[in-house]
Image (cartoon, rainbow, N blue to C red):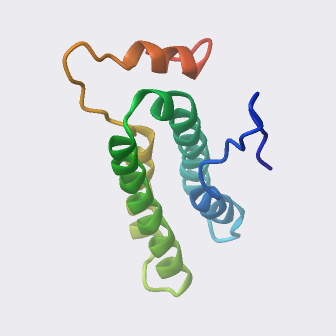
Amino acid sequence: MSEPDAFGRILAVNNSVSLGVFLAVAADHRTPFAVVELAGRGVTASASANRWVLEVGKPSLDGFTLADKLIEFGEWEDRLVGLWQAFGRGEVGMTEFEAQLAELVTAMEGWPTVPMGPGEDFSSRLRRVMGPGADG
């Protein structure tokens, strides 16, 4: 459930489509441990993306740039849902599923990439947001 901020606004970014898929992947009885690990990385990437939007993207980017970033992430979520559905229908085998899932998770882990204009450096702010012990 979403929590209100100091002004009473709800801080939800989305309904965590990717989180639902990653949890379903991890819970599926056909899933080998390597794929469960990928799903766990996906959960972390999804949570990190949502946190970045709230704590860095919204305060730092103009609406159009942020919208472009959210569309980019949404496209990966769409691919993730399609992949999971194709696997469930038997259209994609485990080897191909794992390879495509790894590709999507790696892309999500690297998100966001924000073009920087003169004098803009979001990296120090992102490092602060990531918390103690974070690489960066």
Whether 54 is drawn above or below 134: the answer is below
Q: Position of residue 115 (x, y in %)?
A: 24, 31
Q: Nearer the viewer, residue 39 or 61?
A: 61
Residue visible at 38% across and 56% down? 71
Relative image position of residue 36 (x, y in whole percent) = 61, 54
For image coordinates 57% across by 42% down, the residue present is 50
Quadrant position of the C terminus in the picture? top left
- In the rendered structure, the answer to whether residue 128 lies left or right of residue 72 reads right
| In-image side of 62 versus 9 (left or right) | left
Can you give x and y, in whole percent of width and height, for residue 43 in the image?
Answer: 61, 47
99 or 118, which lies in front? 118
Where is residue 110, by image quadrant? top left
Tell me if residue 127 comes above or below residue 32 in the rendering: above
Q: Of residues 108 and 123, which is closer to you in this image?
A: 123
- Relative side of 45 to 91, left or right: right
Residue drawn 39% across and 69% down? 96
Q: Residue furthest front?
A: 7
**Relative image position of residue 57 (x, y in whole percent):** 46, 33
Q: Residue at x 72, y 44 (%)?
A: 10
Corner quadrant of residue 129: top right
Looking at this view, name the residue that lies furthest to the left.
118
As rendered, which of 85 and 66 lies closer to the eye? Answer: 66
Number of marks in picture: 0
